[in-house]
Amino acid sequence: MTEAEEVHELLSDQLWRLNNLYWCIDPEGKPYKFTMNWAQKLLFYGLHYLNLILKARQVGITTFFCIYALDLCLFNPNKRAGIIAHNLDDAMAFFRDKVKYPYEHLGCDLDEYGNLGEQPEWARALFPGADQDRTNQLSFDNNSSIRVGTSMRSGTLNFLHVSEFGKICAKYPERAREIVTGAFNTVHVGQIISVESTAEGSEGYFFRYCETAFNRELQGAGLSELDFKPFFFAWWQHPSYKLRPTGVVITKELAEYFAGAEKELGITLSAEQRAWYAKKYELMEREGSGGDMRREYPATWKEAFESAVVGAYLATQMAWLRKNGRVGRVPWVPNVPVDTFWDLGMDDAMTIVFHQWTGFEHRLIDYEEDSGYGFEHYAELLRRKPYHYGRHFLPHDVEQRLLNKKGTKRKQELLELGIRPVITVPRPQDKVRIGVAAVRKFLYECAFDQENCAPLIKSLDNFRREWDDKTGRYKDRPLHDWAIHGFDAMQTGALGWTPPANAQSAQGWGQQGGWVANSEWSP
């Protein structure tokens, strides 16, 4: 076999090409030959039409798909590939380091000084040079091209990769919608889309896609060309996430976490794996980001979404509630009055939190959220519930007059419907400084029913700062999205609630009615 025939045979094998042709740059700026790691091999052999990748950090998923897309275009005519990054800086870095650099050094070898030599003659003959007609695109002689950007609406693509889609959903919801409605539709059925990210809270397209895909997999449902195939790469699967355990202290909290993970997953974590996780967690705690550990290095796909959303106002408090077993089953206590906290929606959602005070804790037992209805609907909703009501706390706008009721105040309508007494809570002068601070303090005395209050818990998890695209920073004001309504109802309670006049008897209900505070609490 001649050298030309040997080269032709090798180049016809995609697996060989992906492990032998391309060079990348490591974090220290040194060139290294790309060869697929454990996670990239699983992706390569398991690739579907639509692929959804949830992962721990530093697995190399975007690098793999950049090389995969470049290879697709180089060795197949008339192909169009697109890579979407979550910001412009990443897009430029992807193009420079993961597309253009591998192309320009295709087939090279290191010289004696550790530098890449010139391309071999066969590489220059096969690929005489790409037309870099834009700063983010390479076009080849075979009429194929690859481009990188932050959006990808125009044209038709044979391959699309979206990097850090969870971050896009959290910080740029409109751009996430543009990707779903625009970029995804540039890829015809039967072509390939890959979407990867770490988790960014339990809301948005990425979370919903993961929830659907992993639950379908659990149920054993088949995959069509329009179903996402889920891939999950956990921290404990990473072969490099190990550390010599000598001198590493495993806290009681981490020991319980490891035991729970082993039981749930049917695995055994080595001492080296435990040591690595413990030191990584210690480092992140020192940097003030310990609450992000499970998002950045999850053990299960569900755990990845338990971590707080970036920019969330109540991240510390919600983590404390979960850590201390304050989110679980919180049953209604029949002989304790139920107070309600409201947020009044005009064009937005109307929300009601159902609350009991035992003399020891605030028990959030129920939650309702709806829109498009008048007060009659909510009065009937309250009547249908079995609760004995105490006080109803409503925000300042309950004092506004209704245009279609001859100037009657909204508060008067509620009273006429039997919702009484109504306590008006003044508007805080500063929603962030006063309102958020009040809710944070209030939460440390709360327990949430995880089933009845699930939408409320999700709202508090996702109530976050507004992102400023121009400055690349969070603004010092809340994002006005769906999550604000549950927060506003809790703010009404946190600012307005005071112990009832018979607060002492609340503590004595255990003796009167056979119920002792916390006796039915079962996290």
Image (tube, helix red, strand yellow):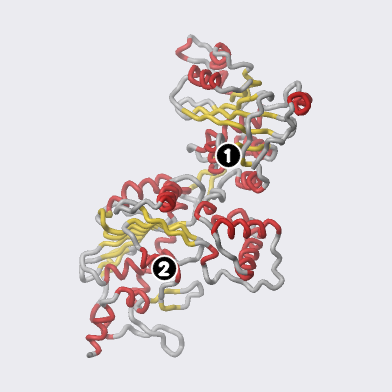
Q: Nearer the viewer, residue 72 or 150?
A: 72
Question: Mark 1 falls on what kind of element?
Answer: loop
Q: Name the residue furthest top.
A: 406
Q: Up-down: is 370 above or below 284? A: above
Task: Note whether residue 298 is visible.
Answer: no
Which residue lies at the image location 48% right of the left edge and 62% below the top edge? Answer: 233
Q: Position of residue 432 (x, y in %)?
A: 61, 38
- Please state which amino acid type lies under the numbered disc 1: Gln
Graded by Cα atoms within 10 Å as few (under 14), some (14 to 19) or many (20 or more), the crowding at tag 2 reads some
Could one spot residue 351 in this view of the protein? yes
In front: 415, or 359? Answer: 359
Q: Amino acid at mark 2?
A: Gln
Q: Quadrant of residue 498?
A: top right
Left or right position of 427 against 65: right
Q: Quadrant of residue 496?
A: top right
Q: Is residue 417 left or right of residue 322?
A: left
Where is residue 195? Give x, y as percent. Answer: 39, 56
Q: Where does residue 206 sit, x and y in percent of width and height? A: 43, 50
Does residue 481 appear to the left or right of 357 in the view shown?
A: left
Residue identifier under label 2: 40
Which quadrant, please, contains the C terminus? top right
Q: Which residue is mark 1?
A: 450
Name the one closer to the observer, 427 or 487: 487
Secondary structure beneath disc 2? helix
- N-terminal of the pair, mark 1 or mark 2, is 2
The residue that appears at 25% across and 55% down in the rendered structure is: 156
